Image (cartoon, grey):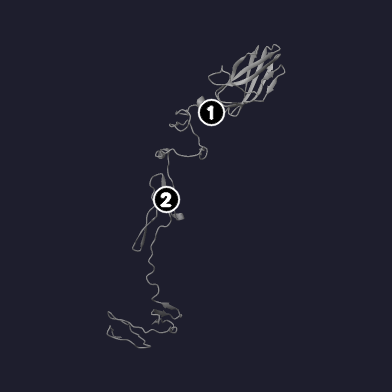
Amino acid sequence: MPLTDNSDSLQTRNLTVEDSLQLGDDTVIELREMSTPATPPSGSLRLYAKSDGRLYAKNDTDTEYDLTAGGSGEVNTASNVGTAGVGLFKQKSGVNLEFKKVNAGSSKITVTDDGANSEVDIDLGTVTVIDLSDVAAKTGTGTTVVMQGSPTITTPTIGDFSNATHDHESSAGGGTLSAAAVGSGTLSGDRLAAKNKTITKIVYIEDPTATDSFPIAFVPDDVTLSQVRGVTDQGTVDFNIEHRATNTPDVAGTDTLSSDLQATSSGASSSSFSDATVPAERWLNFNASAVAGSPGKLWVAIEYTID
């Protein structure tokens, strides 16, 4: 078959071409639109145009292909979503989507490519106490200190007690609390062990008289009296227990019992108080009011609980 060019026109139906068809430059092939043709014979392929403006081919198994389908695909891009955080998408360069890398800013964080699990693993690296040197603010609310686990604190040195409201020492181990600090409601270790315990003070008075008046105990903490007892070897002694101010034990104070207790040789006790609450830093004073029957010995016991 001779070589054709764009000046030739080929419009022949049922044309069988045995030779190779060579088309010249700028040659246009025009195919008339038609209905779907019948299945071609075995080993043949039919090429045709249909009224929808598309080019089709049908093989010898009666399968039709749209040769103009598919196009150039969608124009894709990418973006970061979410309301907070740092996005990983950087930009699209041509058909390539470019993402940022996840980088460990210091040795305190490790970033590992876990290819086996298709993951990027982020974990803590080596964190020491010195890494917290930039934590300067001392803020917080409430009265509860929460520590994770069961930490062991060994002889700590606390440099600032300005907000502690007591005179604890800024030294290794913290030092001890003075009586003033205990009076403000903060107990040191030795006094904490006695808190809420019931204490009994016992005094022996020889040859008691009706004018006896002297301190028999000193309470550094707030206490509540619970019982007063008195026993003589013979006769009776009437007395009350006063609480007096720290620096004036010789000045009359406040009676604690509702009425004077009369101690006898068979013993007497009272838990009836007009003022059982004794403030910290007070003297407990024995104050006799009457003696009968020539007693030679008197034992007085005072029970109280540390508040």
Give the image quarter of residue 266: top right
Indicate the amino acid at tag 1: Gly
Give the image quarter of residue 32: bottom left
What residue did someone put label 1 on?
A: 189
In this rendering, the count of numbered labels is 2
Q: Where in the figure is residue 233, as x and y percent of width and height?
A: 70, 14
Figure quadrant of the N terminus: bottom left
Q: Earlier in the sequence, mark 1 or mark 2?
A: 2
What residue did someone put label 2 on?
A: 112
For residue 21, the mark is none
> In the image, what residue occupies the spot 50% across and 25% down?
180
Q: Decide: is 68 above or below 142.
A: below
Asked if residue 171 lies left or right of residue 7, the reply is right
Mark 2 nearby-residue class (10 Å; few <14, some 14–19, many ≥20): few
Cα–Cα gap, marks 1 and 2: 50 Å
Q: Which residue is nearer to you in this view: 133 or 18?
A: 133
Secondary structure beneath label 2: strand
Are the residues flagged by discs 1 and 2 in contact, CB closer than 8 Å?
no
Q: Where in the figure is residue 134, as x and y percent of width and height?
A: 39, 39
Q: Where in the figure is residue 202, as x and y percent of width and height?
A: 63, 19
Secondary structure beneath label 1: helix
Q: Decide: is 282 above or below 18.
A: above
Dot in front, 1 or 2 = 1
Mark 1 nearby-residue class (10 Å; few <14, some 14–19, many ≥20): few
Indicate the amino acid at tag 2: Thr
Q: Where in the figure is residue 154, as x and y percent of width and height?
A: 48, 32
Give the image quarter of residue 281: top right
Figure quadrant of the C terminus: top right
